[in-house]
Amino acid sequence: MRVIDREEVRQRLTYELCIPLVRQAMIAFSKGETRQHLRSILPLGEGRAFGIMPGALGEHGVFGAKLISVFHGNFAKGIQSHQGVVVLFDPESGAPICIAHAGEVTAIRTAAASAVATDALARPDARRMAILGYGEQAGTHARAIAKVRKLEAITVWGRDAARAKAFAKATEAELGVPVFAAPSVRQAVAGVDIITAVSGAREPILEGAWVAPGTHVNLVGSSGPGPTEVDHDLVVRSRFIADSREGVLAQGAEFLYAKAAGLIDDSHVVGEIGQVLAGDLAGRQSADQITVYKSLGHVVQDLAATKALYDAG
């Protein structure tokens, strides 16, 4: 059995490789060509959970699962919040053939998926981005989205001003793009074209009133039905597109809270990013429309990324 460790994933799963992989995986998912169940999440107490994500890349494609723990307190210790493995099985024999480091695969493919959605939904002239959060996903999203839009400036907000400034300095040095730490969320999102929320906030930090017409928003930080990073107003005002419609209807916190408040119904999730990418659903409909991509993460992304590493030897 092949073992692909964290360092190998980091070195070989580049955004140039992963972005088109995720794009094709989500098209296949929305066309019904893949097989999967909703994620099963086992709560383990405050800030800790264990998830199981099974799936197959088609009837005759590789199949497997991601087994992942999420410990939000790890970041303060300098440890990845996501720990686990992606396991691939051979479609001919049913034998396990590969184990890959799930934390690193998740970090890269999540950002690649947001880049795919940003490329499809953000205005073509989008040049300024705000990142809400300064953890691992903030860095991966800055790198990935810089591959699909020529960013001229990035603002970042985080609860710890010193850490936000440190992130800004390091990201500016890496990407060669001006990066500024903002003292508030409202100031961070003022005048931007793209907002990427990766904060993991448990209560809304972003208000719809602060989001300008024409903005594209990636909602990434909440991966279950509990925490939410944005208020009802933003959800209601937006063209709301999911990675998985079924997943968001069951586990998308921002959508579920607005629905529970009686402000929207299931039809507000207009469809999936795979449908937009395939040309089966309109993405952005006008220059002043606010678009939202709700990311919960999907096992077909993990399987496609891990298979590519395995096939390359």
Image (cartoon, rainbow, N blue to C red):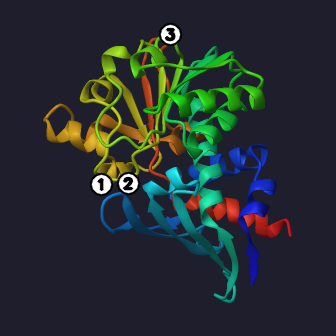
Q: Is residue 135 above or below residue 58?
A: above
Amino acid type indicated by mark 2: Gly
Q: Alpha-carbon neighbours of circle 2 within 10 Å: few (<14), some, or many (≥20)?
A: some
Amino acid type indicated by mark 3: Gly
Q: Is residue 9 above or below residue 283?
A: below
Q: Which residue is mark 1?
A: 250
User: For residue 89, which quarter of the picture?
Assistant: bottom right
Q: Alpha-carbon neighbours of circle 1 within 10 Å: few (<14), some, or many (≥20)?
A: some
Q: Residue at x 41, y 69 (%)?
A: 50
Q: Which residue is mark 2?
A: 247
Name the mark on residue 191.
Answer: 3
Mark 1 in CB contact with mark 2 (< 8 angstroms): yes
Q: Quadrant of the N terminus?
A: bottom right
Picture mark count: 3
Amino acid type indicated by mark 1: Ala
Q: Foreground: 211 or 262?
A: 211
Q: Is residue 11 left or right of residue 77?
A: right
Image x and y of residue 259, in percent = 20, 39
Q: Residue at x 54, y 55 (%)?
A: 77
